[in-house]
Image: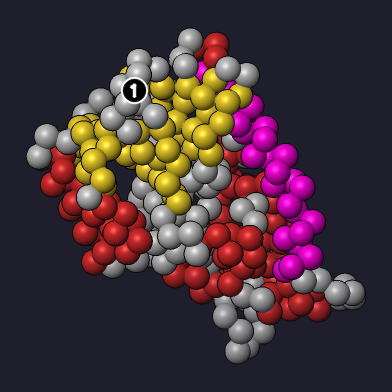
Amino acid sequence: MNRVRSIFLSDIHLGTRACQAERLLNFMRAYEAEHVYLLGDIVDFWSLGRGIYWPPLHNTFVQKMLKRARHQVKVVFVPGNHDEALREYAGSSFGDIQVLREAVHTAADGRRFLLIHGDEFDQITRYHRWVALLGDMAYGMLVRLNFLPSWFRRKLGVGGYWSLADYAKRSLKGALEFVYGFEESVAHHVRRSGFDGVVCGHIHSAAIKDIGGITYINCGDWVDSCSAIVEHPDGRMELVRWQEDAVAVEELMPETPTADLPLLAPVVATLRRLDPVPPGRASIRDIADPGTTQPQR
Ligand SMILES: [Mn+2]
């Protein structure tokens, strides 16, 4: 058992099949802390809205959090965009879990951190919510169902070769630009607000780095990278990548979804126009079943 001062988690996406609840529970078993911060997208209501998926392990995580909160651990929950329905409960609490729109954490070394989910700094989810929602479904479809691209190309009468691998490679540059832009705008905001640093989530890209004198920290996610931030008793922050073997999977599938949303939106629109699909094929509504969707940011 590792004793740390704080644990920071985000983007767990309970309620989706992609959520790595078992690994998360193993991680939580290994760490004891005075503070636990849940920084958004803990429960994926977007996915649950398309159908309920709630296995026992997801329930176990919630129960464990409530139990820790009852036993003198300060548990704070800052809702994200996938659990934004809970933002209206900011200021109240679930059991002993405090719900806040944003929080401030003073580290053992005196540094003051702003704690947010971060979607307000994502230009796409902020200004084009419908694109984000459609992209959320489209991403899952494209990742899981390889037959789709060739199928809709055939329907459209467009020739040529299209592969997911090419698509992922082409979008990698866009993904990097997206991550960079997000980190910069978060750091800019935090600097102006007078904090020493920020702990956030949302983009599923874990990091601890200095951006122009600001300590930028991102918790990552529990969908594929399985990462968390811990604060040691002396205030030192550490990025924990739980089970390094997950890295290979990350490399296969770059974390690009939000950056690709403008590209995916017409795809979804096209698929919708073509629905109902030929007999024997799943309809778009079946395809969008939460069981087959990869949650994103
Ligand atoms: Mn998010």
Quadrant of the rendered structure where residue 74 is?
A: top left
Q: Which residue is mark 1?
A: 107
Q: Which residues are magenta?
A: 164-190
The spot of residue 218 in percent (x, y) is 49, 37
Secondary structure, mark 1, is loop
Compared with residue 135, is residue 284 higher up or lower down, i.e. above or below?
below
Compared with residue 129, is residue 266 higher up or lower down, i.e. above or below?
below
**Can residue 89 be seen by looking at this rendering?**
no
Residue kind at label 1, given as amino acid type: Ala
In the shown orientation, is residue 74 left or right of residue 27?
left
Compared with residue 271, is residue 77 higher up or lower down, i.e. above or below?
above
Q: Is residue 187 magenta?
A: yes
Q: Is residue 42 magenta?
A: no
Quadrant of the rendered structure where residue 26 is?
A: bottom left
State the residue at coordinates (47%, 22%): 197
State the residue at coordinates (58%, 39%): 125
State the residue at coordinates (28%, 30%): 233
In the shown orientation, is residue 78 left or right of residue 18?
left
The spot of residue 168 in percent (x, y) is 72, 60
The spot of residue 101 in percent (x, y) is 36, 27
Q: Nearer the viewer, residue 168 or 4?
A: 4
Question: Would you say the magenta stretch is mainly helix, strand or loop?
Answer: helix
Q: Nearer the viewer, residue 45 or 225?
A: 225
Q: Nearer the viewer, residue 72 or 242?
A: 242
Outermost right residue: 159
Outermost left residue: 71
State the residue at coordinates (56%, 31%): 209
In the shown orientation, is residue 273 left or right of residue 183?
right
